Image (spheres, rainbow, N blue to C red):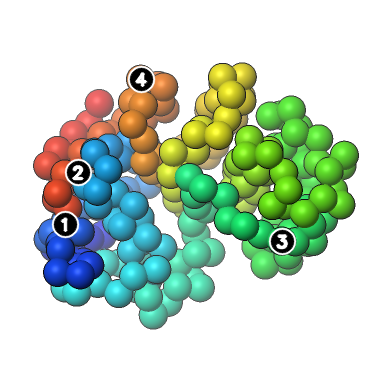
Amino acid sequence: MLVVAEEITKNFMGSKVLDTVSMTINRGDRIALMGPNGAGKTTLVRAILGFYHLDSGRLKVLDYEPINQRVEVLKHISFIPQLPPPVKLSIDELLTFVTKSSQISKEKIFLQASQMDLDLKTHISKPFYKLSGGMKQKLLIAIALSKKSDLLIFDEPTANLDPKGREQFYELLTDIDADCSTLFITHRLDEIASLVNRKIYMDLGKVVEDERI
């Protein structure tokens, strides 16, 4: 199993954002993580990534503890946030950092980007934060898909993409390794129905539905 959560709880200012959540993610799982705003979806993902200390329960990612062994955990996960970070590095500097830290080839990133009609060479000297929202998202997707990961996590990955960009993104996902698991935080199950085999629905910090589809 890639992820094992056993009755994990996280409180913020007296409110239970995660309320004794138990779940597993296995190899090959393609999960749509759904629920209203404030349901705990993003908090669950951030706990998996090692951003938060939990108040109780047990969480393991490939037998690593996300907080204490975060570097090891992040070697196996690619994450695309809903809002791109305000990175001030140029595209060239960002790609150099990524390739050195994650052992990804620049050539593969350029190829993935080109399949979404993003010509990185044209923008190579631009600061990342000056790109349009759609271009930022395409670059982050290209980086994530270029890394050999056990788990890909997408937080509303198509929010900044136009219809053609969404179509290109979903087409790229059909080529990922069968053993690689994916977790989509999404409100659009219809868009990714052909890419998922499991739906988890959260509300008020709890998993209220977990089924194969």
Residue that badge 4 annotates: 190
Amino acid type, mark 2: Met
Q: Which mark is residue 200?
A: none
Q: Which mark is residue 88?
A: 3
Dot 1 falls on a residue whose secondary structure is strand
Q: CA distance from mark 3 to mark 2?
A: 35 Å
Going from N to C along the chain, the mark reached first, 1 or 3, is 1
Near-viewer residue (43 or 78): 43
Going from N to C along the chain, the mark reached first, 3 or 4, is 3
The label nearer to you, 3 versus 4, is 3
Q: Is residue 63 visible?
A: no
Could you tell me which residue is drawn at 27 percent across and 43 percent down? Answer: 37
Dot 3 falls on a residue whose secondary structure is loop
Q: CA distance from mark 2 to mark 1?
A: 10 Å
172 w.r.t. 21: above or below: above
Residue that badge 2 annotates: 202
Mark 2 touching mark 4, by CB under 8 A? Answer: no
Amino acid type, mark 1: Val
Could you tell me which residue is drawn at 68 percent across and 29 percent down? Answer: 116
